[in-house]
Amino acid sequence: MPQTTADHARRLLDLHTQPEILVLPNVWDVVSAQVVAATPGVQALATASHSIASTFGYPDGERIPLELHLDMVRRIVEAVSLPVSMDFEAGYGHPGDTARRAIEIGVAGGNLEDGMRPLGEAVAAVQAVMEAGRAAGVDFVLNARTDAALRATPEQSRTQVIREVITRGQAFLEAGAPVVFVPGLIAREEIQEVSDALGQRKLTVISVPGVSLPARELQRLGVARVSTGPFTQRVALTALQDAAADILGGGTLPATTRPLN
C-alpha cells in the first residue's frame, strides 16, 4: 500500500526518537537522491538548499526562485520511497505558506532558519509551520534552526553563545518543533551542554569535514540527527575535479568508479 505524506512524517518523527542517531547525507537532485536512498542503512532523505541553488547557478540565501526550488524537491520526493525533509531556508517570507506548499508535494519535514531574527518573530515562524502541518493532517517534522552559533561574533564569549542557543532552542521546542538544528556547534562539551538543556534526541547538528565528531560519538551525547548540508555535494564535486585533473594530467579515471546512474 502506498505511503502517504502523513505516514512518512510519522516515520520521520520516529527516526528522531529512536536510540540510534539519524544520519542524513543531504541530496540536491534526483540522481543524488536515488544514490543515497539505495545506500544500505539510509532511512530518510534531506535536501540541501545551498546545493539545489548551486545546481541551477544561484547563490545560497533564498536567491533561487521558490517555484524552481519546490519543483526540484518534488522530483526528489517522486523518485524515492523514503521520507524527505526539505530545507526551505527562512521560509521565503511566508514560512507557513511555504511549509504548506512543501507538504502538498509530499515533504514530511523541513528546516527553518531563524536568521537571528528577534525571538518573538522566530517563534511565530515556527508556530506557522507547525500549524500548516496540523491543517494538512501531518505531524510535520520541523527541524527548527537557530544561527546563534553560526553567526557568533568574536566579541561574544562562548558562554553567551551557548546561552543564546539554549534560549532559542527551548523556545522553538515549546512552540511545537520536535527538534532543534544548531549549525556551528562542533565542540564535544558544547554539544553535550546543549543536548542536556534541550533533552535527549532533541538536538540536530551538521557534520563538517575534518572537524566534526563521528556519528557514534554524537549519538552518545544524545544528538537526534546529523546531516551534511552542502558538504555531500562538495564531496562529489571534489571527486569530479580531481578526476578531471588526473585525466588531463595524462592519467585515467579512477578504477573504483561505479555505474550508479
Image (cartoon, rainbow, N blue to C red):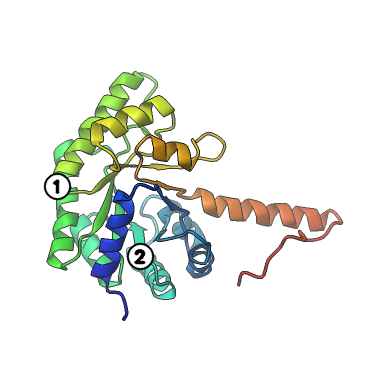
Q: Position of residue 210 (x, y in %)?
A: 57, 36
Residue 257 visible in the shown view: yes
Q: Secondary structure at mark 2?
A: loop
Say few, some or many: other residues with alpha carbon within 10 Å of mark 2 (under 14 / 14 to 19 / 20 or more): many
Which residue was labeled with disc 1? 124
Q: Tell me: residue 20, above or below residue 97.
A: above
* Amino acid, disc 1: Ala
Q: CA distance from mark 1 to mark 2?
A: 26 Å
Residue projecting furthest to the bottom: 1
- Tally of marks: 2
Which numbered mark, 1 or 2, is in the foreground of this view? Answer: 2
Q: Are marks 1 and 2 in contact (CB under 8 Å)?
A: no
Residue 28, numbered circle: none
In the visual, does 218 lie left or right of 199? right
Q: Tell which of 99 and 2 is nearer to you.
A: 2
Q: Tell me: residue 220, above or below residue 127.
A: above
Q: Residue at x 19, y 56 (%)?
A: 129
Residue projecting furthest to the right: 250
Q: Residue at x 25, y 67 (%)?
A: 103
Which residue was labeled with disc 2? 83
Q: Tell me: residue 196, above or below residue 92.
A: above
N-terminal-most mark, 1 or 2: 2
Quarter of the image containing the C terminus? bottom right
